[in-house]
Amino acid sequence: MVPRVRIKDVAMLAGVSTATVSRTLSSPETVGQKTREKVIKAVKATGYRINGAARDLRQRRARSILILAPNLSNTFFSQIFAAIQEEASEVGLTVQISDSRIGRDRLLSLGQDGRADGIVLLDGGLDPDVVNGWNLPLIQLSEWNIAYDAPRLGIDNHAAADLAVEHLAGLGHRRILHVSGPQENVLAVTRQEGFLAGAKKRGIDQSVFPGDFTLEAGAEAARFWSTMQHRPTGVFCASDECALGFISECAHMGFEVPGDVSVIGFDDIDFADRFLPSLTTIHQPRNEMGRTAAKRVIAMMRAAQGEDAEPAPDLKDSIKATLVDRASTGRAAL
Amino acid sequence: MVPRVRIKDVAMLAGVSTATVSRTLSSPETVGQKTREKVIKAVKATGYRINGAARDLRQRRARSILILAPNLSNTFFSQIFAAIQEEASEVGLTVQISDSRIGRDRLLSLGQDGRADGIVLLDGGLDPDVVNGWNLPLIQLSEWNIAYDAPRLGIDNHAAADLAVEHLAGLGHRRILHVSGPQENVLAVTRQEGFLAGAKKRGIDQSVFPGDFTLEAGAEAARFWSTMQHRPTGVFCASDECALGFISECAHMGFEVPGDVSVIGFDDIDFADRFLPSLTTIHQPRNEMGRTAAKRVIAMMRAAQGEDAEPAPDLKDSIKATLVDRASTGRAAL
DNA sequence: CTGAAAGCGCTTACAG
DNA sequence: CTGAAAGCGCTTACAG
């Protein structure tokens, strides 16, 4: 590694002070024409780049957003990451990502070591003391936890689950099985509540199979379903993964989807529309979620740095989820 | 935001110098027992955390790895990110990610602003001047570019393509279609070369449909395939996405896989084994790729910082790719 | 419009 | 074992 050139080197070459070099780079209009030219020439000649670490320290900011998610390899998150990154990049911010299930101390450190000035949190299962201890602009995205002292953003999971029930009911299904997610997860609980309310409201005969969002849980649910006396003709899974597992296992057992059973998923992950049959599911606009969260946290960061006095407007209205009607659902057989 | 506590505050409270606080935190064994206790007590009382930005500036390092990929939302990358992040986190390093297709200037800046001290590059299509201009420990993962002055890591794409041909040939297929990737991509070109060599070697009747890795290209290839006079009985796609598109389109057109045509993909993405039929494909061990790349770049970073004199060993041996035999391939119909 | 100087919050030779 | 002081590489009042 060749030694990097510092602002001092540029200043000497241009025959000006470091202050002038700094000004030329950050607010050229405050520098005289001729001086500016000299400096720019010297910058080009040396290939100088501002040392971000030094700039950040001096300005007491990090120009960086930290994204925390419970499982980075989860395909549901990647589009959200991409959207946040894009939004951040546009305003010159850097993006850090970390698995949120690292040790408590490391986690605390991430939000307290001064190398991030805003957080997008995709995990509602962390210790509230840790989250509140960060004391940084933070937004909860998708998952949430009422013990976190921070605004949240996401779809209305209760209403979305109702959408699923409504769709199945509209197709004539009178017995519906819900394959739920883990009960310690807010999303799972809220979707289940929405399902139960929707079923009750419409006089649907409901049952719930306790799952955990995974493919395997879906397959297990399908085996359970096949043994039921009065098999539900409709199934609402708390995640797409789970729905795909359910459908795959049905195929193995010789049942047809949607001929024998209609299946709805949740999320609309990348492969939902490529699966055979393509999956009817609840679409979560992940790009919009990521962009909005990024914008929101950036506004909070600006406010925290006093760049504008007014706090970011509270976006109470949730992101809109929609049902995507594909091939895995059909009219109920009588 | 409450004002953060600085090392000075801790020092005053403990009645020692900042140097002693610093030592207590970084090398406690060099500090006297009683002093250490006082300091630790003061640290606890104040909730002090080292300011990473200041530490980094002083030590001229960033404790951060930068990951660059051409498309963050691509499901192929997420497991790699997760693996790198895990490995990095274990040694106290932070991970930044960025889309590599941002503007040239921003890109240059990312590697030159002193906020990363190592790079994992998953894009072989960048301007070599930019890449070589970073002057940071860097490893090329998966994709590569001979113009980049950096070690590379990945599978042997040529050999992997041969594996696919071998598999189809072994099932009796004598006419094979290759749906290639974009010709400006090294992976696509290398896989195609491997395919052609493998076909030639075995006296296979080959043809190539120019694709671009996408689902749509696969669907298009399927339509083309259906119009061929002597339809190939085997198809090798340069990516899983593409293979899924091919299979889906076959289903729409009323062809069966593998009854009418056997299809092999490439990558073994998450959904390859959940698709119906499950996809025979070339498995790329993404977790291993990520971990190995991380270890490698960390070793290079250490060497660059002079922590150990010997340079990192050159891992010429590539990561091993294997063929996963699933349900989308079968014996050739006569 | 420009420069000298202070300071962001740490770490680390150096001296004792 | 401990402290005073310098310095990492910038930016920014302050003064002129």
Image (cartoon, coloured by chain):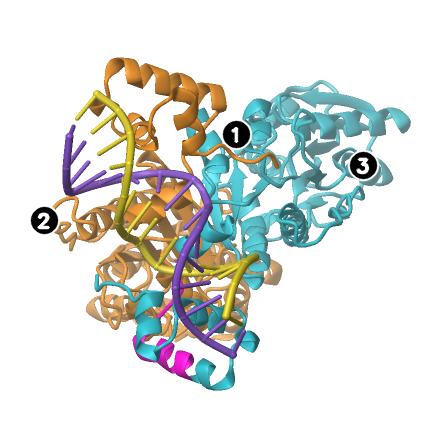
Chain colours: A cyan, B orange, C purple, D yellow
Q: Is residue B231 visible?
A: no
Is there CB contact under 8 Å for labels 3 and 1? no
Does the segment drawn in magenta span residue B266?
A: no
Expressed as whole percent of the image width and height from the top left, the position of residue A42 reads 35, 79
User: Dot 2 lies on which element?
Assistant: loop
Q: In which quarter of the image is the C terminus of chain B?
A: bottom left
- Chain that bears disc 2: B
Label 2: how many residues lie within 10 Å, few (<14), some (14-19) or many (20+)? few
Residue, disc 3: A159
Residue with the mark numbered 2 = B310
Relative to B169, does residue A145 appear above or below in the rendering? above
Looking at the image, residue A264 sits to the left or right of residue B298; the answer is right
Residue type at the position of mark 3:
Ala
Chain label for disc 3: A
For marks 2 and 3, give the one nearer the viewer.
Answer: 2
Q: What segment carries the magenta color? A: A38-50
Q: Helix or strand or loop: what does disc 3 sit on?
A: helix
Q: What residue is drawn where x is 20% and y is 68%?
A: B201
The quadrant in which residue A9 appears is bottom left
**Dot 1 amino acid type:** Glu
Marks 3 and 1: which is nearer the front?
A: 3
Q: Position of residue A267 (x, y in %)?
A: 65, 43
Which residue is disc 1 drawn over? A216
Badge 1 marks a residue whose secondary structure is: helix
Residue type at the position of mark 2: Glu
Circles 2 and 3, Cβ within 8 Å, touching? The answer is no
Q: Are marks 3 and 1 on the same chain?
A: yes
Residue A109 percent across, percent down from the top left: 45, 33
Labels 2 and 1 in the same subunit: no
Q: Mark 1 lies on which chain?
A: A
Please indicate whether residue B5 sits to the left or right of residue B59 in the image. Answer: right
Marks 2 and 1, how far apart at CA: 47 Å
